[in-house]
Structure formats: C-alpha cells, structure tokens
Amino acid sequence: MEFSELIRTGRAQAELLPGPEEPPLRGTLCVTGHHLLLSPGPPSTADLWLLLLRSVDSIEKRVAGDSGTITLRCKDLRVLQLDIEGVEATLDIARSIEALSSLESVITSFPFFYRPKGLRLGDAWHFHPPECYYKRVARETNAWRLSEVNQDFSLCPSYPRAVIVPRAVDDDALARSARFRQGGRFPVLCYHHAPSGTVLLRSSQPLTGPQKRRCAEDEDLLRAVLAGAHPGARGFIVDTRSAQAAKQARMTGGGTEAKAAYPGWKRLHRPLERGRALQESFVRLVEACGDPEQSMDRWLSRLEGCRWLAHVKEALSTACLAAQGMEREGACILVHGAEGRDSTLLVTSLAQLILDPLSRTITGFQELVEREWIQAGHPFQLRCAHSAFSHARPKHEAPTFLLFLDCVWQLGRQFPLSLEFGEGLLLALFEHAYASPFGTFLCNSEKERCLCEVRTRTHSLWSGLNHLKEQRKLRNPLYVLNPLAIWPSVEPQSLRLWQGLFLRWTRPPESSEVAWEKVWQIVTEREKTEGSQPTAST
C-alpha cells in the first residue's frame, strides 16, 4: 500500500488555532504520509508548523457554508483547530488524517523513515543492554549469573534475550519454571540492594490452577534466591492483585504461590488498578482538566471522582512497601500480578528510584526505563495506542507508564534536589511513548522489535535526548547526589495534580517554569564566575 492512496486532498488553505495564549497561523496546509504541515504565507515570518499524524488521537469535523473546521485532539493532550477553505477539501483532509493516523503496521511508521542530521543508525541502542546492569551486580555479589536461556525468545516471548538469575539454578530448571509461569515469565532479578544484600525480582503469576499444581524447579529457584542473600534471609511476594482476584485467577488456570511450597516467603496482596479502569480514570481526569467553565466545587468533585491521585498514592505506597522490605527488613522481594507486564513493572521501577541513587541520575533513569519497561516487555504498542481522547472503546489501552511518570514527578516535587532530571525529561518520555519519530517505544517486546529490525532501521530516543542542546531542558540545575533512600509522603496533602502535563495546553506557562529558567541562569552565571576566578597561590 502506498501512502498516496490514502491522501484524498494534498493541500488546502487553512487557519490553525493552536490553543490559548497562541496567535492563529494562516497558510497552506499539506498532508504527507506521516505529517500535517502548515506553511505560513506572507507577510508572516513564522516557522513551518509540523504535526506527526501518529500523535492524533481523535478527529472531529464540521462544515458550514463553503468552509469547514477540523478539531484534532492529540495524544499529548493538545487540542488543535483547523479552519479550512472548501467543504470538499475539509472532508477529504479529515478522511486522510483518519486513515494515516491509525495505520497499524509498525514498519510503515515514521521512525523507519526518520533520518535526522547528526545522528547515525545504531547509535545509542547499545547504551543500556542487560549485560551492563549485570556487571554492576557481579561487582556486588557472586550469587547471580547472566543467562541467555531466552536467546531465541522461545522460553518467554516478552523477556529480553539475557536475564539475571541465581547462579545455583541451571538453564533446564529455568525452562521448567517458565512453563509454570504465565507467559513464561519466571522470576528474574531486576535490582540488587547492596547495603542489605537483598534483591528485587519480578515475574508473572504461577499456573497453579484449581488442582493447585506445583513446580519443584520454581520452588527451588525462589529457595536459591534466599540462599544467595544473607544467612536467615526471608522473602515477601507482593501480589498486585486483591486476594479475591488472585483466588478467581486460580479457577482459570492462574493462582498464587502456596505457603507450604515456598518456605521463607510470605505473600502480601496490594491491589493496583490496571487496564480499562485505569484508562477510564485517565480519560475522566483529562475531561475535567479541559472544562474551563466549571465551578470550584464541580472541579474538586471531578478530581476526586476520577481517582487518578488515588492510583498515584496506591502505586507509591506499594513501591514503598517493597523498598522498606529490602532496606529495613532485610528481605528479598518478588513482585507480580497476573501477566507481570504492567503494575509489576510500575512497582519494581519505583522501588528502585526510592532506594538507588544511581537510578535518580539522568543516565541511570534512562537505563531504568530501558531495563524495567522496554526490555522487560511492557506492551507499549497496545497500551499507548490511544491516549485520553479516542472515541473507540478501550481494548488494551492503559496509561500505566504515564502513572509511573506521574509518580516520579511526585518524587521530584517532594525531593527537589535528589533527581538529576526535571519535568522536561518526564514530559518527553510521555510524548514519545504515545507518538515518536524514534523507535525506542515501538512494538510490545524485544522479540517484536527484533523481528521488525527496529534497532538497525530506526534511531534510539536516547541518542536524541542525550544531545547537548537537549540537556538544559532535561537536567535539574539544583541536583545534589543523595546517597540515601528517599521516602515519599503519600498523605493526601502531599500529592498534587501534575499541572505541567494535565494543564499544559490549557493555561499560560506557570510561574514555576519561569522560575526553573531563572535558576538555570543563576547556576550558569555562578559556574562562569567560579571558572574565571584565579586559584589562590600557596
């Protein structure tokens, strides 16, 4: 299929209304295979306006007289209005945008055509391989090894090729454990906490079923985890489902780890919303944020009713539970829900941010996202197919990754000196997860990315973000290395709406953004002054 077959009208005269506080832009509107372009006509000196069609979440059209209006609601929560000359041109352009913004083929998406200046294909894809983190673990303990048992993805299609497992467990035992876990996601290490000698693991649910099946190799694996920690170590299994949901899962082939089969491990249920309930919470919050006419009482009622901040609280609370188990109880932690690809990753990644100072650096945070979300098999293509504006009924969509970013923003707000990155990096990750010229968030697993040759045919987001000109937007000028754990407050008074994201396009830049730029100027001027001062002679 050629893109030209989907473009009914290539160009038209139009006026763009980008949103509050921004002047309209008039010129020639053009539709290409991947972009919507508006070239301002004279006497305007404005730059070419460009919109990646993949970022369109929903489109509305209406006609009146000899013109029409198209409203584009974007995945980054922008709302754009296009006033177009000609009824036929309006309808044709709307149909073209609808067709081009919803193409399902990965290899026809823009990252496979994007060739920016200064970047080479293959750059930065090697930044964060699993082997890199294993080298760090190997320096701290000899109880773990890097296994390539999943080299061809046959054992677990959603795991990367290499995983970190107990040294005492051989690959044959791992294979049998994988057959006992949903989707083959057997327990693997995601973080070693050197101060306590404990580890954080993740997996999917065991397939015990109504017959309460057991797997000796799976039991041996978790026994080896405790043996590889400190003498007398114990473990907690943090199940992100309710006890009732876990019980129901057993009737359909899933289940939980039986206490008698896993001595030394205790199960804790900390239910976290996922799937449709989380998506609907996101939609209701965005609807509330986009209504400028509501009263204060109505706004507060809708903010509470959408329960988004309740989800933030529950995610942070569960992450703190896992982190406290390692830091204060000296226990090993295994986190799983059902599939282990959503709320499980949310908890394990937040727990590492709380405990690990390296994860709070720019490079460490990028590695965390790569290791705990992308390589760990979060299905980005399914979860981020639509944002908050789509008229389609949610199928697989869920803003789990956005919830993670919101929790990180809460950490940064409560500990403003402890994160090397600022809001700019979190906003960039949100935007690129839903629509991006880079290939980093494409597909649902490493296996799919390999089949589509994503690493050799697209550019990595990290290569773009690590460019020097981007650093000022991403870096926290107040950052000071904090070697301690950071324990967030989850009291209602401590959690805030992330205005920089949810109100980003509906109000002028807030004072904090101006203050951020001012702090950068002060820090830069101080560094210049200190650099120009002569050193004292002795």
Image (tube, rainbow, N blue to C red):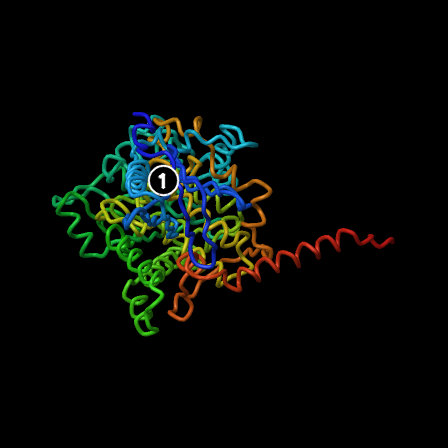
In the displayed structure, does residue 41 sit left or right of residue 88?
right
In the rendered image, residue 414, in percent from the top left (x then y), is placed at 48, 63
* Residue 430 in view in this figure: yes
The residue depicted at 75 percent of the width and 55 percent of the height is: 529
Examine the image and state in which quarter residue 286 appears.
bottom left
The residue depicted at 23 percent of the width and 47 percent of the height is: 392
State whether residue 291 is above or below residue 46: below
* Residue 334 in view in this figure: no
State whether residue 314 is above or below residue 252: below
- Indicate the quadrant containing the N terminus: top left, top right, bottom left or bottom right: top left
In the rendered image, residue 358, in percent from the top left (x then y), is placed at 52, 48
Name the residue beneath numbered marker 1: 54
Examine the image and state in which quarter residue 107 appears.
top left
In the displayed structure, does residue 417 sit left or right of residue 88?
right
- Of residues 430 and 229, the one drawn nearer to the viewer in this rendering: 430
Residue lying at the far front in this picture: please name it: 66
- Of residues 114 and 379, the one drawn nearer to the viewer in this rendering: 114
- Of residues 132 and 281, the one drawn nearer to the viewer in this rendering: 281
| Neighbourhood count class around disc 1 (C-alpha, 10 Å): few under 14, some 14–19, many 20 upward | many
The residue depicted at 78 percent of the width and 52 percent of the height is: 532
